[in-house]
Amino acid sequence: MRFAYYGGAPGMLTSAAVWLTAGVVSLRVSPERGVWALLIGGMLIHPVSLLLVKSIGRSGKHSPGNPFGSLALATTFWLVLSCVLAYTVSLLHIEWFFPAMLLVIGGRYLTFSTIFGARIYWACGAALVLAGYALWRTNAAPAYGAFSGAALEAGFALAIFATSRREAAYESSATRFPSTPGA
């Protein structure tokens, strides 16, 4: 999973762009339209990230029997149901939508630690959850929540890209210069 999807970094970077778009729409049009920008843009994250993955030379496919593929799919169903809940909450208090989504996405990233075998997802999930809680407690304007999601995900995506790049370079050098047994 980690190799095929470049550690999940393209998906997270795509998600950051969706959060950024939702923030801009919240400021320039309305918070309600910002909600829809995040929900509709969220549906495009996977296909756009697959294009990115393939453009950097990875397959974007995992082996058919890989149980982590099923886990990723299961968390997607959980995500969709949670989006319905966050949207319903936004009908009561528009300021709560983006903090609720930060909690949802933060929780989903905790499972990505298992899917991609990378502990950085624990830190990312915790950061998103803490940001969501802080924004909810302060009753922050909706755009702040969207921009927080964009900034946090962009930062973590860059860190994951760097890690994945180092891993690829290490694996490439290991295949070119295999260690000699008994040396």
Image (cartoon, rainbow, N blue to C red):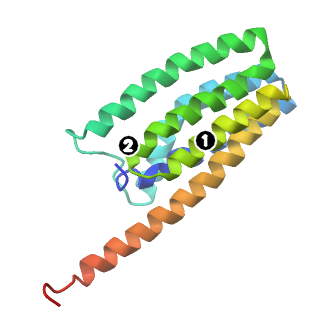
- Label 2 crowding class (10 Å Cα cut-off): few <14, some 14-19, many 20+? many
- Label 1 crowding class (10 Å Cα cut-off): few <14, some 14-19, many 20+? some
Residue 115 - label: 2
Which residue is nearer to you in this view: 160 or 56? 160
Q: Which residue is mark 1?
A: 126
Measured from the top left, where is residue 117 in percent x and y? 38, 50
Q: Amino acid at mark 2?
A: Ile
Name the element at disc 2: helix
Image quarter of residue 141: top right
Name which of mark 1 and mark 2 comes first in the sequence.
2
When the figure is inspected, residue 82 is found, relative to residue 109, above or below; the finding is above
Is residue 77 in sight in this rendering? yes
Measured from the top left, where is residue 148 in percent x and y? 74, 41
Residue at 57%, 59% in the rendered image: 159
Residue at 44%, 60% in the rendered image: 56
When the figure is inspected, residue 58 is found, relative to residue 134, above or below; the finding is below
The answer to the question of whether label 1 and label 2 lie on touching residues, with beta carbons closer than 8 A, is no
Measured from the top left, where is residue 61 in percent x and y? 31, 45
Residue 183 - label: none
Residue at 65%, 39% in the rendered image: 128
As drawn, the residue found furthest toward the left would be: 182
Residue 6 falls left or right of residue 36? left
Q: Quadrant of the C terminus?
A: bottom left
Name the element at disc 1: helix
Is residue 25 in sight in this rendering? no
Residue at 84%, 25% in the rendered image: 139
When the figure is inspected, residue 79 is found, relative to residue 131, above or below; the finding is above
Residue 179 falls left or right of residue 105? left
Measured from the top left, where is residue 121 in percent x and y? 51, 47
Q: Amino acid at mark 1?
A: Ala
Q: CA distance from mark 1 to mark 2?
A: 17 Å
